[in-house]
Image: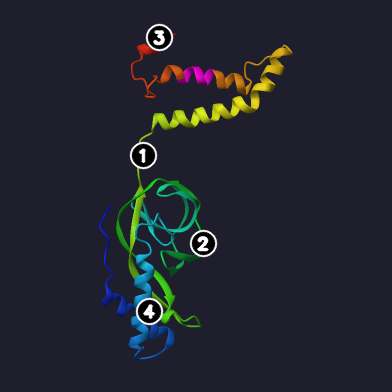
Amino acid sequence: MTTIERLDIDRLHREITQSVKVAHGVRSPSQSDTQKTIELIQKCWEGFHGMPPMLGEWVKKGDEYVRIAFVRSRINFRDTTFQPAKAGSFYLHEGCGDFAGSLDSPVTLDLKHIGWRLAEFWIFYAGETGARRGVYFTIPTRVFAEEQVAADPASFRDDIEMLLSYIREFESEDYENQKADGQCVTNHPFEIAQRIDSQLQVLFGSDGKLRTDPTVRGERE
């Protein structure tokens, strides 16, 4: 995990001041309101720390950077299904952004934090809602990239055995009835489950580890 970046307060002050001048048409924005806005931004920004990938943060795909605009599902950093966006606006909340714009197609990746990159957000000046009170600024935002996770044979075996257990529970009676009636059961789900279970016994040892010696199969057979 890369170290946490620090907010550049001077840059924030300059960006907010300029944004207020443009939005309000004033020459000298209130210093107290600007300071309050900066404090709100800092609190929101700190809310990202330690969280899984959130809206408004970056994902690096090859040489391209896209921002997470909508998260459909995730298991912490694993199996994160999100919809990216190359354009749009992000309102800053505590620990996440709120996106407005067009979404790209969903992507599912295992993500890891690899660094930081500036990203633009907006917030209501001094926390007070109203017309022309939105101010734009940039803050350091986490960058994620796909993590190549090695397949875990033991986990694969657990998933298969869970499925086999489900099939045995709900298909065994139908299988026995068809067999008693003299029907062909070669491709019945229960029969397939039995064959898969036999193969698992060959592929995995009693310790649950994947066998690597090809002669083991011949000895078992």
Residue highlighted by disc 3: 218
196 magenta-colored:
yes
**Where is 133 relative to 50, above or below?**
below
Compute the Cα span from label 4 to label 1: 41 Å
* N-term mark: 1 or 2: 2
The residue under the point 37% across, 79% down is 37
Secondary element at image label 2: loop
Mark 1–mark 3 distance (CA, rounded to whole Å): 31 Å
Q: CA distance from mark 1 to mark 2?
A: 30 Å
Three-letter code, disc 2 = Ser
Q: Looking at numbered disc 4 in the image, what kind of residue is underneath it? A: Thr
Q: Between disc 4 and disc 1, whose residue precedes?
A: 4
Q: Quadrant of the C terminus?
A: top left
- Establish if 15 lies above or below 108: below
Choose the circle earlier in sequence order: 1 or 3.
1
Q: Nearer the viewer, mark 3 or mark 2?
A: 3
Q: Which residue is mark 1?
A: 149
Instruction: Residue at 55% x, 19% y: name it.
Output: 194
Image: magenta residue range: 195-200
